[in-house]
Image (tube, rainbow, N blue to C red):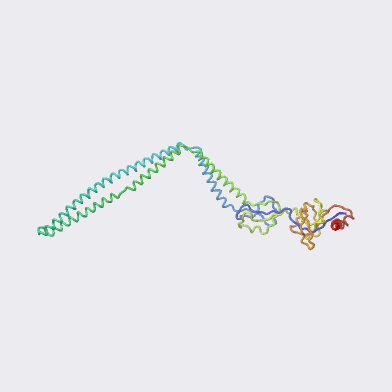
Amino acid sequence: MELKVSSELIIAPAENADVRPEVEGIIEEVFVDEGDQVAAGDLIVRLSDQNYNFEIEKVTAQIAGARAHLNMLQSGPSREEIDLAKSKVTTAQAKFLHATERLEEAKRILSERIAKARTAVEKATQQLATADREYDRAQELVNERIFSLKQLDDAKSIRDLRQKEMEEAQADLAMLLAEDLAELRNGMLVAQRETQEAQNQLTVLQSGSRPEEIEEAKADISRLVAQNDLLMEQIRLLNVVSPISGVITTEKLREKKGQLVERGALIASVQQLNTMIAEIPVPEKEIADIKLQQVIDVKVLAYPSETFRGHVIAISPKALENQNWDRQKTVVVKAELMNSSGKLKPNMTGHAKIYCGRRSVFEVLTRRIVRYFRIEFWSWW
């Protein structure tokens, strides 16, 4: 007769995978919902790429500019560029010469005006001294009753006039002495600086590009290209796909649209339900009779009138403590069941019979007694 080992079981999917994004982003579109069948690589959700597109446009423009700069360095300056640089030097030199001449001319004119102002001050000083003497003499003559008071007033008016003329002449001299021609000096310095800059640019063009400048430009391009590749990879990762073929088991998946998800956060679960796994905790005293590929029949509580057939695919390498009252240890046996009808669901429960091969009726009926004597009775001696 056939030796059978029976035990309870729980149904699990043959393969279970989580759909997790590799980058952070906002869910822009959801393509599946709970219960949908998907294949490995099918698109589950797409994250927003708005920020990445902006960065790619910026980096693309930088790459174009860097390559143009490298081409310019490698080809060297053209004859037109050198001629233009020479023209700028000539123009700057002429501007500097003109500014220098203006400054010198202004210095000459200022010097002449200062000399005239000094002469005017000296003349006004002499005239004031003469007016002072005339006023003093007029006072003496008035006291001697030779001059009238009107003549004294006239002498005083002349003295006051000479005093005012001297003060004006001194003020004009002071103003001229304070004049430093700052605007013209600044103009000359600016023209001198522009001349030097134009000459430096011409020297750089005539000497050509240095090797280290070319290498630096190439390094800039390599850095920008690497940055662009990284951004493109980030955009590729915005398409979150299913890692396996199976059925979406996450509830209300479409309601996640617009949510911000972090890198590695769970978006959905996919379970492969065409093939199911029956996890059977077999008592350790029965495990010696269990072998790989042995046939198994399963009945689940949901379908008591149907039998599902499979075969053993794995035996756990360790025993676990059972949570029942007897606390006996069990070894989990896994069997593969075909589920083309889709009736088997994850976490369903039921019972399984594992067919361990044909044995004699006597062996089947007495094997537990024999096991007891071979172990328990043996331990007494």
- 122 sits left or right of 265 in the view: left
Residue projecting furthest to the right: 362
Where residue 28 appears, x then y in whole percent?
Answer: 61, 55
Residue 263 appears anywhere in the view:
yes
**The N terminus sits in image quarter:** bottom right
Q: Nearer the viewer, residue 154 or 118?
A: 118
The picture quadrant where one finds residue 85 is top left
Where residue 202 appears, x then y in whole percent?
Answer: 43, 39
Q: Residue at x 34, y 42 (%)?
A: 100
Residue projecting furthest to the bottom: 325
Residue 337 appears anywhere in the view:
no
Number of dots carrying numbers: 0
Residue projecting furthest to the front: 381
Where residue 374 appears, x then y in whole percent?
Answer: 86, 56
- 216 sits left or right of 243 in the view: left
The picture quadrant where one finds residue 284 is bottom right
Where residue 295 appears, x then y in whole percent?
Answer: 81, 52
Q: Residue at x 37, y 45 (%)?
A: 189
Q: Nearer the viewer, residue 115 or 307?
A: 115
- 84 sits left or right of 177 in the view: right
- 117 sits left or right of 312 in the view: left
Q: Nearer the viewer, residue 133 or 83?
A: 133
Rendered view: 222 above or below 321: above
**The C terminus sits in image quarter:** bottom right
